[in-house]
Amino acid sequence: MDDSVNLFALGNSERQFRFQQFCIADDRATMRVGTDGILLGAWAEIESARRILDIGTGSGLLALMAAQRNAQAFIDAVEVDEPSAQQTAENFHNSPWADRLRVWTEDFLAFAQRFELEMTFDALICNPPFFRAGPRSPHLARSRARHQVQLSPQDLLNACRRLATANGALYLIVPARDEGVWVANAEEVDFRPQRITRVRPLPKSPFKRVLIRFSTTRQVCKEDELTIELAKHQYSPEYRALTREFYLP
């Protein structure tokens, strides 16, 4: 889905996205700011969380959105790609919430193994590698960010389960075609879907993405739908309501 935030150029190489309360430069990040991340960052129910983990942060988008939405939370972000992590650190430093944000330049599975006895999180958010097949980028960092090269759904879910508090929740955005795969893998580690929102770009389009909240709490899963645009560049009232705290007027 297309990027849909204000973009302005700084010099010849730096891209920066301007939101209502913060800006993000992403020209050195493996994954750029886009609609998927904005959807997840606005949709995840993180208002009451005290500790939040952003997995594969890219340029820091989800962590910064969480910091804006929750004034009490401390947020850790993990990013294996060093240039991306460095840019995330700069974006954090330039934000109003630098004292509550921290980035770790580390493989997520190594991070989980190292800290599972020391740190737990009330909310974990992740825009995970989507693609199981298809052409890969010749650049390892970008291929690792987009394809399930080193972080399979099973490994991601298992590590998140170990890092979650007793009532902690994991929030993901995944391709609609893979919804069943993620739900089945999550149930193997006692993560149950509690909320599912299926997202389509236009009213008559098929679903392209699915937002899922997983937790160990057993309850009836709430399911709904979201349409992003009624027509090209005409955003739906539901999408505008969801993202109203972030987009510039």
Image (spheres, helix red, strand yellow):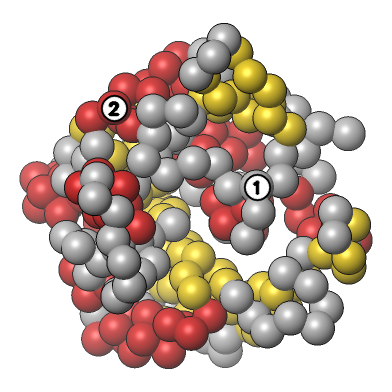
Q: Relative to the observer, which residue lies in front, 53 or 34? A: 34
Q: Relative to the observer, which residue lies in front, 76 or 3? A: 3
Image point (59%, 24%), residue name: 16
* Residue annotated with mark 2: 83
- Report helix, strand or loop for mark 2: helix
Task: Report whether residue 202 is seen.
Answer: yes
Name the amino acid type tagged 2. Answer: Pro
Q: Quadrant of residue 75?
A: top left
Image point (39%, 67%), residue name: 130
Name the amino acid type tagged 1. Answer: Asp
Q: Which label is found at residue 103?
A: none
- Figure quadrant of the C terminus: top right
* Residue annotated with mark 1: 3
Q: Position of residue 101 (x, y in %)?
A: 42, 27
Eyeballing the image, is 162 above or below 125?
below
- 137 lies left or right of 177: left
Q: Quadrant of residue 45?
A: bottom right
Q: Position of residue 47 (x, y in %)?
A: 60, 48
Eyeballing the image, is 237 above or below 177?
above
**Local crowd size for mark 2, using a 10 Å CA cut-off: few (<14), some (14–19), many (≥20):** some
- 96 lies left or right of 114: right
Q: Relative to the observer, which residue lies in front, 34 or 125? A: 34
- Figure quadrant of the N terminus: bottom right
Task: Report whether residue 101 is seen.
Answer: no
Image point (39%, 34%), residue name: 29
- Report helix, strand or loop for mark 1: loop
Q: Position of residue 133 (x, y in %)?
A: 30, 75
Image point (65%, 54%), residue name: 2
